[in-house]
Amino acid sequence: MSNNGKRELVLEGLECTNCAMKIEEKVNAIKGVSHASLNFATKVLVIETDQVEKLMNL
């Protein structure tokens, strides 16, 4: 059984591409996050992790 997980979050009020880039960098630096990407146009942050339990707390 795999413990990998994926979560999509909508970041309302995001209006700055530079801020979006900083958020993506910081989320990628979180321990347990295997990959994070933020689409500025849709304001959707996708987080992938190998620890599903951490995703449940977001």
Image (cartoon, rainbow, N blue to C red):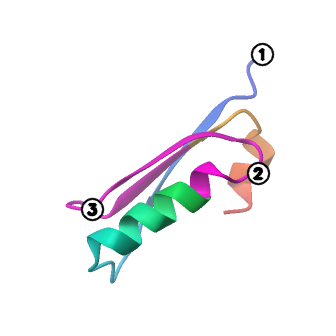
In percent of width and height, residue 15 lies at 26, 80
User: Dot 1: few (<14), some (14–19), or many (≥20) neighbours within 10 Å?
Assistant: few
- Judged by depth in the image, the label closer to the viewer, 3 or 2, is 3
User: Dot 2: few (<14), some (14–19), or many (≥20) neighbours within 10 Å?
Assistant: few
- The kind of residue on which mark 2 rests is Lys
Quadrant of res 11: bottom left
Element at badge 2? Answer: helix
Which residue is label 2 attached to?
54
Sequence-earlier tag: 1 or 3 = 1
Residue 34 belongs to magenta span: yes
Element at badge 1? Answer: loop
In percent of width and height, residue 35 lies at 55, 39
Left or right of 4 on screen, residue 23? left
Q: CA distance from mark 3 to mark 2?
A: 24 Å
User: Dot 3: few (<14), some (14–19), or many (≥20) neighbours within 10 Å?
Assistant: some
Report the span colored magenta.
Answer: 27-47
Which residue is label 1 attached to?
1
* Quadrant including the C terminus: bottom right
CB contact under 8 Å: marks 1 and 3? no
Please name whichever residue, 23 or 8, is drawn nearer the observer in this view of the structure.
Answer: 23
Relative to 43, residue 50 above or below: above
In percent of width and height, residue 55 lies at 69, 51
* Quadrant including the N terminus: top right
